[in-house]
Amino acid sequence: MKSSPRSEGRKFIIPSFFFIIALCVLAFINEIRFDSLLSFGRCALSNVPMNNGSSETPLLSSSPVDDEIRILIGILTLPDQYSRRHFLRMIYGTQNVPDGVKVDVKFVFCNLTKEDQKVLVALEIMHYDDIIILNCNENMNKGKTYTYFSSLPDIFNETDAQKPPYHYVMKADDDTYIRLESLVASLRPLPREDLYYGYVIPCPSMDPFVHYMSGMGYLVSWDIAVWLKDSEIPKKHLEGPEDKVFGDWIREGRRGKNRFNAKWSMYNFPEPPTRCTHELWPDTIAVHLLKNQEKWIRTLNYFNVTSNLKPSKLYHIP
């Protein structure tokens, strides 16, 4: 007997109906599984330490909740380095930082000893207001770094202030090029207390808890500067390579439980090649050992620092 078209249609509709129901049930189950997996992933990520060589501290768990960041960069130099200071003012004065971020760049040296310095440096201060003169005899490895950090609380702290004047304070060499926006981005997720940040020495090392940070540029949170002012530990050990001695203070005082190794976003200029050098690349925070104008120009050209130059009838730069 030949089946009617209506019965054939029913045979098709009924299995299709159950098939659609099965798909809906499967989708519902998968949605539940996905939500559970997503929740698990969020839980796991919240406990993952953000470490560049650090193996102790889950940095993300103590990250700041606001976007405001205040940074002081102290460039240790000499009183007679007038042209270097003017050059660096252009380098840092033409860099932009995000809204809510304050980066102060100051030039740091010891007491003036010449009559011409008293006039020329005074004029710089009157015009730029970016110089700190420490009460010390000029030196590199006999306590100048200690005088710098330990003087900051008295120079900048206000007795009625609810917040520290800076979240972070940095010591840098005058042959180091620091890209401010990259520095700020690297600091955003990091703690604002007991932080020791920089390029780990020796060069092959990636563990910031073994030795110390290179003198090209290292940074600590404000509370460590306050500790250096009050502690007897650094006063007993002032002489020696300043970056190594600083690391000795941190270790002996059991400070810097939060550490960040910025290698290889910080590195020495590529030439001559050593274990500390690296090719210039976009993911850069600082380049060190820019000992002459040629190295500075190569570095600045690579990062295209004049890209924001506006056209004008006043000049023609091909």
Image (tube, rainbow, N blue to C red):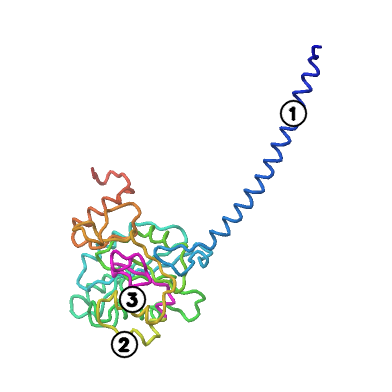
Rendered-image quadrant of the C terminus: top left
> Which residue is labeled 2 in the image?
236
Say what secondary structure mark 2 lies in.
Answer: helix
In percent of width and height, residue 32 lies at 67, 48
Farthest front residue in view: 1
**Residue assigned mark 1:** 15
Label 1, residues with CA under 10 Å away: few <14, some 14-19, many ≥20: few
Disc 3 packing (10 Å; few <14; some 14–19; many ≥20) = many
Apparent side of residue 152 relative to residue 139 in the rendered image (left or right): right
Between 152 and 206, the one nearer to me in the picture: 206
State the separation of the CA atoms marked 1 and 2.
Answer: 87 Å
- The segment highlighted magenta reads 199-226
- Amino acid type, callout 3: Gly
Residue 194 image offset from top left, x and y in percent: 44, 74
Q: Examine the structure image and report whether residue 308 is included in the region drawn in magenta.
A: no
Residue drawn at x 46%, y 74% as measured from the top left: 164
44 or 142: nearer the viewer: 44
Secondary structure under tag 1 reads helix
Name the image quarter holding the N terminus. top right
Give the numbered dot on residue 247: 3
Mark 1 to mark 3 CA distance (whole Å): 75 Å
Q: Position of residue 58 (x, y in %)?
A: 49, 66
Residue 207 belongs to the span the image colors magenta? yes
> Which residue is pictured at 51% across the width and 68% down the height?
62
Name the element at disc 3.
helix
